[in-house]
Image (cartoon, rainbow, N blue to C red):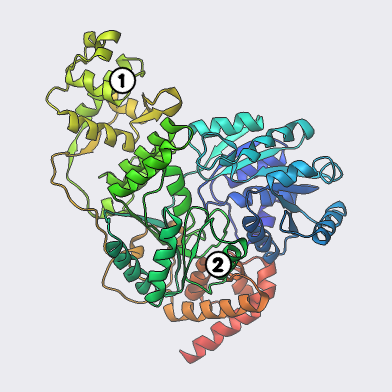
Amino acid sequence: MNAFDILKRYFGYDTFRPQQQEIIEEVTQGHDCMVLMPTGGGKSLCYQVPALLMPGTAIVVSPLISLMHDQVEALKANGIPAAALNSGNDATEDALIRRRCMAGELKIIYLSPEKLMSEIPYLLSSIKISLFAIDEAHCISQWGHDFRPEYAQLGTIREHFPDIPVMALTATADKITREDISRQLHLSGKTFISSFDRPNLSLNVYRESTKAEKMKRITAYIRSHPGDAGIVYCLSRKSTESVARDLQRSGIQAASYHAGMATDDRRRVQEDFKTDRIQVVCATIAFGMGIDKGNIRWIFHYNLPKSIESFYQEIGRAGRDGAPADTFLFYSIADIIQLKSFIDESGQKEVNMAKLQRMQEYAESSVCRRRILLNYFGEETGHDCGNCDVCSHPPRRIDGTLIVQKALSALMRTQQEIRTGTTIEILRGISSPTVIRHGYDKLKTFGVGRDISVAEWHDYLLQMLHLGYIEIAYNQGNTLKVTQIGADVLYGRATAQLVAVTRPERPVTKRVPTPKHGPAPTTGRAQVMFPEARLSKVEDNRLFEHLRKLRKQLADAQGLAAYLVLSDKTLHALATEMPTTIEDFGNIPGIGEFKQKKYGETITQAIRHYLEQH
């Protein structure tokens, strides 16, 4: 079989997403590569398809036992032989897995980094390995948002297996982190950076500070979306327990999750959430990386995250199946104070403080929020998204071309070696010690922005950063650099629109999003412009709910999570196309041969019966 045959047979799709095919070809030719794709963007297929194409067994390094378990179960649900070697197994399980591996029965094995290092002289030296895939590769880097010291040992893979391709995969890594990953793993191949855009996610920020205000919004949203699973991320363990209790008092099935809980309790909560026995998990950041649940429909951040990397990773838990999902961020000054106190006690204080500042700027910005996120990860975009609160309530804009050109000219004439403060001093004509010492008062741009106040310049430079005209080099003293689209404005090849900073202060608000099922008076998810979700027919909402209940029954009977049987996106397609034959059922996206044979008769019979009744 070729890659397309495997994609259709095992995963039920006719076409690859952007860059997946190129990545697969690169690996199957024996080359290393680094893959940056947003959560839900299809990273797993990039190593799963080559694993099925190539002779031998693919070794996947993963950080958490629960994540390995989810991915192994998902592969098995598609008829793919896979297993995980980790500390959660007993000696008998490990022995059986090793025997199956030695016999060539397993195509994919998941290991923790510690387990991989201990197995190099034994199992890994005794089997044919097709490739190494390092998942959550940002954990390798000291610049990553979740540094894992044990990941740093993975560079020795190249010493022991010099001829086997190594693939590093992550959903969040800025330029510095990417360079660090490549250096530590000794990667010699290409870097593939997919679009970080997740157009199915709405982005919303609320400036709420009291618990009562937050709980009112959260409770109202959950009640308007019955049956939709979601996560409330909290900054402290105490908050997770308090929020969960309040939701339970409101009749919502919720539970808390944090690192201070007993292992068995955490495992129970996670299993209940995966199998839809509870609707909501209130969690610290300890929860998320360890779950591969595809039908999470919303995320609330009860507090401001510590960095955009953390924020993007966490909102990425929603809508992994590609169907519309909503994300909300609460922001208050109290969060900033608490996070700064954490940073004061950590290593790399300067870098972490700069990342927190960028997160704060995101929350306070009047620029399209998706543009801010994309530009942070080095992805240039020239248009607003239409699916965030800023786009829903657009501020007054002005032609800011001349303002941008003045600022960029100051950066270029200083060889891009200055920070924000010095840039403003040059533009305002302020003879500070730094300006005088470097002779910046002799520049042609010295004082060209006297008509704009210091506060206004801060705002405009922040907008320029968010719009992608400049970027911050954290590893070069936080100096400002001109980007390619910034150069286009500087040299007159493009114009720039900025938000007028003299506008009155307005609160960041958002109407309650529309429930997916049935009519509602407000706007929300229905506005999502997501090409894959555009269907030629009208979805039957009652059939969707009927199929969702049937999916739960099928999952419970097998001890599986519901999304492993069929994704929400597949259910929406079924409720739209209404296939009544097994052949037509197999043509629905996400239905491979294994699931077609396993569920085809049951699902199509249920649809036929529903159509007869209605």
Going from N to C along the chain, the mark reached first, 1 or 2, is 2
Crowd rating for badge 2 (residues with CA inside 10 Å; few <14, some 14–19, many 20+): some
Q: Position of residue 66 (x, y in %)?
A: 63, 58
Q: Position of residue 378 (x, y in %)?
A: 43, 36
Q: Quadrant of residue 466?
A: top left
How far apart are labels 1 and 2 at the CA level?
52 Å
* Quadrant of the rendering where the N terminus is positioned: bottom right
* Quadrant of the rendering where the C terminus is positioned: bottom left
Vertical comparison of 594 with 352: above or below: below
Tell me the kind of residue under disc 1: Leu
Vertical comparison of 424 with 220: above or below: above
Residue tagged 2: 269
Q: Quadrant of residue 591?
A: bottom right
Residue at image location 18% in from the left, 28% down from the top = 454
Residue tagged 1: 411
Residue at image location 61% in from the left, 70% down from the top = 565
257 left or right, relative to 30: left
